[in-house]
């Protein structure tokens, strides 16, 4: 069940809403077209079945990446692409305009599909694997993946690339100077561009 999160909120806790009226409006929603076209330009030369397959594959990729989003963004993306609820239906629940919500979904999905997003996810996965190996070998924490990617870089990458926060918001959240956040952010970009020419893993 989709629990609405306020526009622009990165909180892990939902605010209350009239879910009863939302559930009543679910009738017939699943028959509507997903708003995937706000991300992918229609390829008019493609046969309909090929476009449907591509759409389905893209939706699966989007949903596979939702665990890396903040709770509010994750629930919104899942409501649109898994539960097939339209932006027009969700906008009143979030006390916002459909156009504003459509732009929010657009920004979210573009971020999730970006090679840099998956680069940072890959670094997080590598770090978890290294920590598990180090723990199994009783070597203690192996630490981040080399000197260029330290704990502060990890947090800045999470806030800016995965959570979509601005540099200023990240500085306030992590209690760092704006200069420091910008330096860590530049470091992430440099590593991303160096790895396989910035291609998605």
Image (cartoon, rainbow, N blue to C red):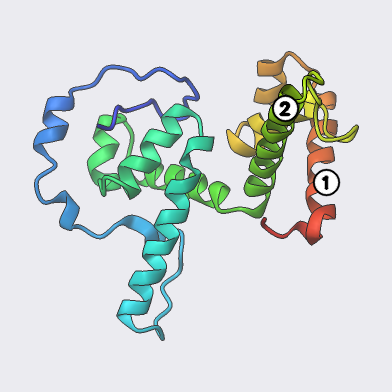
Residue situated furthest front in the rendering: 137
Q: Is residue 64 visible?
A: yes
State the CA–CA distance, disc 2 to disc 1.
21 Å
Residue 99 horizontal side relative to residue 104, left or right? left
Q: Quadrant of residue 152?
A: top right
Residue located at (65% from left, 31% from top): 158
Residue located at (11% from left, 51% from top): 28
Q: Alpha-carbon neighbours of circle 1 within 10 Å: few (<14), some, or many (≥20)? A: some
Q: Is residue 167 visible?
A: no
| In front of the other: 80 or 120 | 120
Residue located at (43% from left, 35% from top): 74
Residue 109 horizontal side relative to residue 193, left or right? left
Disc 1 target residue? 191
| In front of the other: 119 or 180 | 119
Q: Quadrant of residue 48?
A: bottom left
- Label 2: element kind: helix
- State the quadrant of the N terminus: top left
- Label 1: element kind: helix
- State the quadrant of the C terminus: bottom right
The answer to whether 28 is drawn above or below residue 167 in the figure is below
Label whose residue precedes the other's in the sequence (2 or 1)? 2
Disc 2 target residue? 131
Residue 102 horizontal side relative to residue 181, left or right? left
| In front of the other: 194 or 122 | 122
Q: Alpha-carbon neighbours of circle 2 within 10 Å: few (<14), some, or many (≥20)? A: some
Question: Whole-percent x and y of residue 44?
Answer: 39, 82
Question: In the image, which is nearer the foreground, mark 2 or mark 1?
Answer: 2
Residue located at (13% from left, 34% from top): 23
| In front of the other: 195 or 15 | 195
Question: Whole-percent x and y of residue 115?
Answer: 65, 54
């Amino acid at each position: 069940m989709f629990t609405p999160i306020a526009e622009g909120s990165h909180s892990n806790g939902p605010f209350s809403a009239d879910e009863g009226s939302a559930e009543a409006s679910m009738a017939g929603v699943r028959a509507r077209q997903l708003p995937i076209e706000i991300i992918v330009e229609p390829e008019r030369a493609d046969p309909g079945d090929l476009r449907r397959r591509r759409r389905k594959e893209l939706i699966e990729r989007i949903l596979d990446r939702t665990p890396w989003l903040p709770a509010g963004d994750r629930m919104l993306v899942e409501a649109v692409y898994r539960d097939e609820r339209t932006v027009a239906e969700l906008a009143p629940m979030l006390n916002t305009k459909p156009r504003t919500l459509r732009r929010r979904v657009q920004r979210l999905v573009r971020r999730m599909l970006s090679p840099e997003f998956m680069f940072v996810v890959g670094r997080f996965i590598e770090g978890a694997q290294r920590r598990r190996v180090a723990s199994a070998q009783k070597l203690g924490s192996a630490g981040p993946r080399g000197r260029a990617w330290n704990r502060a870089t990890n947090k800045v990458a999470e806030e800016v690339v995965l959570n979509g926060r601005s540099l200023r918001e990240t500085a306030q959240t992590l209690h760092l100077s704006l200069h420091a956040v910008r330096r860590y952010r530049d470091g992430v970009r440099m590593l991303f561009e160096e790895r396989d020419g910035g291609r998605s893993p």
